[in-house]
Image: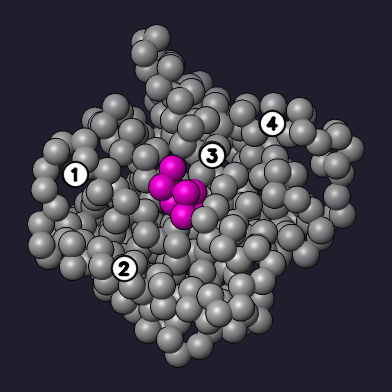
């Protein structure tokens, strides 16, 4: 292996791992933000306002350098808006709603199922039968999820089922978003379109907030904004660009395998930072889901 290839592979590996840890931290930071007694919409609005500054700066910088050129057709603009509102915005809002009711560990593991949903969606779109090994992997994943939920099923409290349903549909809308981006923007500058899609999602979030909340509710304690800053930078902007850049260097199969570290990181952070409890049956569930997602085709 040449030093150039080794350097590219190493850099790609670091970027994908950085993205995985960053995305894992978002769930933990969301739960920390809720300790300031804010509602999901206010938290999401604060996040997109702060992250929007980063995305806008990156967009302006690349446009000024000539790296990106805004030459979109009418169809592409419509797709950007649809994917931004129906994908990124809706998925993020449902995620924040769900985490308002359930633990970070379970929330992250439900979101971790999105690759299984992508497989099912692609099978429906292409009318291609799902292979027997893939069906086994799907059963393994969803059996693992049931084991994660088991300790709470006997005595559900605080809208546990509602929170679970919210995050399940968050994973589903995110899977639809990924399928849409891959189908319509394959071969184009992913970072460029991600910036535009996030911009469309941000506009939707802000309009929702202005219609549903008084403007003064955006004013929160300083500690809350520190959490939002970390969420916007370390768990939103940096992971998004790190993952797309790392994916280009190491390829999708290796990136998918490296991303398996994400749920494990979330479980440990949930236990040691949030003092969440996880029992043996849930640990088995986590392992089943990781194996299932890792082996799925």
Q: CA distance from mark 4 to mark 2?
A: 34 Å
Name the residue: 37% across, 84% down: 284
Q: Which mark is residue 208?
A: 4
Nearer-N-terminus badge (1/3)? 3
Say which of 41 and 281 sits in front: 281
Say which of 222 and 181 sits in front: 181
Give the percent coordinates (x, y) of residue 76.
Answer: 37, 17
Nearer-N-terminus badge (2/3)? 3
Q: Which mark is residue 90?
A: 3
Relative height, residue 100 to residue 270 (above, below)? above
Pointer 1: residues within 10 angstroms few (<14), some, or many (20+)?
A: few
Nearer-N-terminus badge (4/2)? 2
Relative height, residue 100 to residue 105 (above, below)? above
Give the percent coordinates (x, y) of residue 165.
Answer: 52, 56
Q: CA distance from mark 1 to mark 2?
A: 17 Å
Give the percent coordinates (x, y) of residue 151.
Answer: 53, 81
Note whether residue 67 is visible. yes
Q: Which mark is residue 123?
A: 1
Q: CA distance from mark 1 to mark 3?
A: 23 Å
């Amino acid at each position: 292996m040449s030093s150039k290839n080794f350097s590219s592979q190493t850099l790609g590996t670091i970027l994908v791992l950085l993205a995985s840890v960053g995305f894992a931290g978002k769930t933990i930071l969301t739960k920390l933000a809720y300790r300031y007694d804010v509602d999901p919409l206010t938290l999401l609005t604060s996040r997109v306002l702060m992250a929007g500054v980063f995305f806008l700066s990156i967009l302006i910088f690349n446009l000024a350098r000539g790296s990106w050129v805004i030459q979109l057709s009418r169809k592409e603009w419509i797709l950007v808006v649809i994917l931004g509102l129906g994908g990124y915005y809706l998925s993020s809002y449902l995620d924040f709603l769900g985490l308002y009711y359930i633990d970070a560990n379970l929330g992250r593991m439900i979101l971790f199922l999105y690759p299984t949903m992508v497989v099912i969606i692609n099978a429906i779109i292409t009318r291609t039968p799902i292979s027997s090994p893939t069906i086994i992997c799907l059963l393994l994943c969803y059996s693992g999820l049931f084991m994660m939920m088991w300790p709470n099923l006997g005595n559900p409290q605080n809208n546990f089922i509602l929170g679970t349903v919210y995050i399940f549909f968050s994973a589903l809308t995110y899977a639809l978003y990924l399928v849409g981006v891959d189908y319509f923007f394959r071969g184009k500058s992913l970072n460029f379109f991600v910036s535009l899609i996030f911009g469309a999602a941000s506009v939707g979030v802000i309009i929702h907030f202005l219609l549903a909340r008084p403007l003064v509710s955006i004013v929160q304690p300083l500690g809350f904004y520190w959490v939002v800053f970390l969420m916007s930078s370390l768990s939103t902007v940096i992971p998004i660009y790190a993952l797309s850049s790392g994916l280009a260097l190491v390829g999708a199969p290796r990136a998918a395998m490296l991303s398996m570290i994400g749920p494990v990181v979330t479980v440990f952070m949930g236990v040691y930072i949030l003092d969440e409890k996880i029992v043996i049956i849930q640990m088995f569930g986590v392992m089943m889901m990781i194996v299932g997602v890792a082996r799925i085709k």
